[in-house]
Amino acid sequence: MQTTAKDTNKSPHKVQTIAVVLLLLMFAFASLLLIALGASVYEKNVTDMQEVSKDRTALAYVTQKVRQADAKGSIRCGAFPVPWESSYHSDALIFTKEIRGENYDTYLYAYDGSLCELTVRQGSDITPDMGAPILPAEALIVREDEAITGLLHIGIATITDNVPKEQTLKLFVRSARDDE
């Protein structure tokens, strides 16, 4: 059987067409793979930024509360006062304010996985579950610096994906200076 010029021209076109289609499919597959990888990286970055934001928010909240209450003798470190419940212990920042001739204490402490805030008249009986949960926190650690009057060491412990983290902050209480 003899081949004509028309038959020989058809065969190379089919091969070229198949090659172009395969090349186009490889390009489309590579593009989809690149988009999927980019989306995965973006999702991880967003998750990481949200975690950092939560940690910073808790520290910013504590800083703001200290700045709001910064008056001579109104800020102290202590423990949340629950003498009858020996299994519970939490450090607390305690802010005292006089309202209409009566003293009120605002406690900032960690309880049941949250940073909590509770404002009560001084001398009131309180329990940790009375406070309003503000932000996620497993523990609040507060210490006054022994060498520098007015310097607070504040730590907020959190657990993310079963990994404990602690964010720390050193904060100076301006009203604690001796020169005022």
Image (cartoon, grey):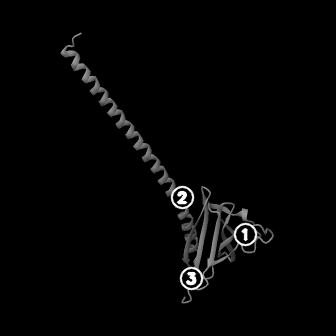
Disc 3 residue type? Ser
* Mark pair 3, 1: CA separation: 28 Å
Neighbor class of circle 2 (other Cα within 10 Å; few <14, some 14-19, many 20+) is some
Which numbered disc flags the more N-terminal residue, 3 or 2?
2
The front one of 179 and 109 is 109
Residue shown at 55%/72% (left/top)?
169
Disc 1 residue type? His
Which numbered disc flags the more N-terminal residue, 3 or 1?
1
Furthest residue toward right: 84
Neighbor class of circle 1 (other Cα within 10 Å; few <14, some 14-19, many 20+) is some
What kind of element bears circle 3?
A: helix
Q: Are marks 3 and 2 in contact (CB under 8 Å)?
A: no
**Residue at image mark 3:** 175
Q: Which mark is residue 141?
A: none
**Residue at image mark 2:** 51
Which image quarter holds the N terminus? top left
Q: Position of residue 6 (x, y in %)?
A: 20, 15
Disc 2 residue type? Glu
Q: Position of residue 109 (x, y in %)?
A: 66, 68
Q: Count the marks: how many?
A: 3
| Closer to the eye: label 3 or 2 | 2
What kind of element bears circle 2?
A: helix
Q: Quadrant of residue 69?
A: bottom right
Which image quarter holds the C terminus? bottom right
* Mark pair 1, 2: CA separation: 26 Å
* Mark pair 3, 2: CA separation: 33 Å
Furthest residue toward left: 5
**Residue at image mark 1:** 89
